[in-house]
Amino acid sequence: MADFIKHPEVPLPDLDPAPSFSEEELVFTEEERAQIAEYVRRYPTADGAVMRALWLAQEKFGFLPPEVIRLVAETLGIPYAQAYGVATFYTQYYKQKKGRYVLDVCTSFSCQLCGGYDMLHYLEEQLGIQKGETTEDGLFTLQEVECLGACGSAPMLQVTNGPYVFNLTPEKLDALLEDLRAGKMPAFTSVTLPQDEDEMGGNRRSDAPQSAVYETPPVARTLE
Ligand code: FES
């Protein structure tokens, strides 16, 4: 039997960590409660609004430790376990405190082929941290993530569950870090993929020099 089956090392979550927020901090304002009530109004039952209410809580508190999840559950009038189950299922809900900006660098297949790891390691060097860590000033958390559904614009990253930055190069990353340090989030953009070979110029990384990492032609050889 494989060793990892005999001795699985599954880190269990701390079910009762020291609270991150005091009782005074742990409240929704009247306005926030009204917003949550408005969410509830749009669904047949209150539990339908749990995702939106958790999102509101994350935007207010920055992350979702157990006491914040409990606040959401109590506000909605649903069992804590139900809100906890949703919050812990989605990685977009942060269970630990993160930096002000969370950089999710995709290293799945397309991004990996187009230099996703080069981009991740470049950010590690520039920020002086490894993936999964947060800079000392609390500004950046760097994460490696699975496919974010923008494979045609690889390599790419996402900033704090928000805008995507496409066709990454070290220069683009430098500019992104500079903008974020100045408090400027990238704009939401959508990308239309080039439709023919001429537009692609033989390489979908149209604004990046072709590198040794990317040697696959844009059209499968079997189709030529
Ligand atoms: S592989 Fe990176 S977005 Fe799909």
Image: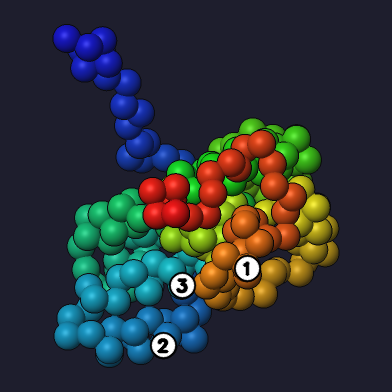
Residue visible at 70% across and 69% down in the picture: 185
Q: Amino acid at mark 3?
A: Leu
Q: Nearer the viewer, residue 216 or 86?
A: 216
Instruction: Give the alpha-carbon distance from disc 2 to disc 3, as whole Å.
Output: 12 Å
Residue visible at 35% across and 28% down in the picture: 11
Secondary structure under badge 2? Answer: helix
Secondary structure under badge 1? Answer: helix
Task: Using the image, determine if residue 42 lies above or below residue 144.
Answer: below
Q: Earlier in the sequence, mark 1 or mark 3?
A: 3
Are the residues flagged by discs 2 and 3 in contact, CB closer than 8 Å? Answer: no
Q: Residues within 10 Å of mark 3 (few under 14, many from 20)?
A: some
> Residue 197 vs residue 135: left or right?
left
Secondary structure under badge 3? Answer: helix
Q: Nearer the viewer, residue 16 or 194?
A: 194
Task: Using the image, determine if residue 176 lies above or below residue 40.
Answer: above
Q: Which residue is mark 1?
A: 198
Residue visible at 29% across and 66% down in the picture: 73
Residue visible at 18% across and 81% down in the picture: 45
Q: Respond yes or no on whether mark 3 lies under 8 Å from ligand 1.
A: no
| Percent x, y of residue 42 | 27, 89
Q: Which residue is mark 2?
A: 34
> Residue 188 vs residue 175: left or right?
left
Q: Which residue is mark 3?
A: 56
Q: Nearer the viewer, residue 219 or 44?
A: 219
Instruction: Give the alpha-carbon distance from disc 1 to disc 2, as whole Å.
Output: 54 Å
Q: Nearer the viewer, residue 77 or 90?
A: 90
Q: Amino acid at mark 1?
A: Asp
Instruction: Give the alpha-carbon distance from disc 1 to disc 3, as whole Å.
Output: 45 Å
- Quarter the C terminus occupies: bottom left
Q: Earlier in the sequence, mark 1 or mark 2?
A: 2
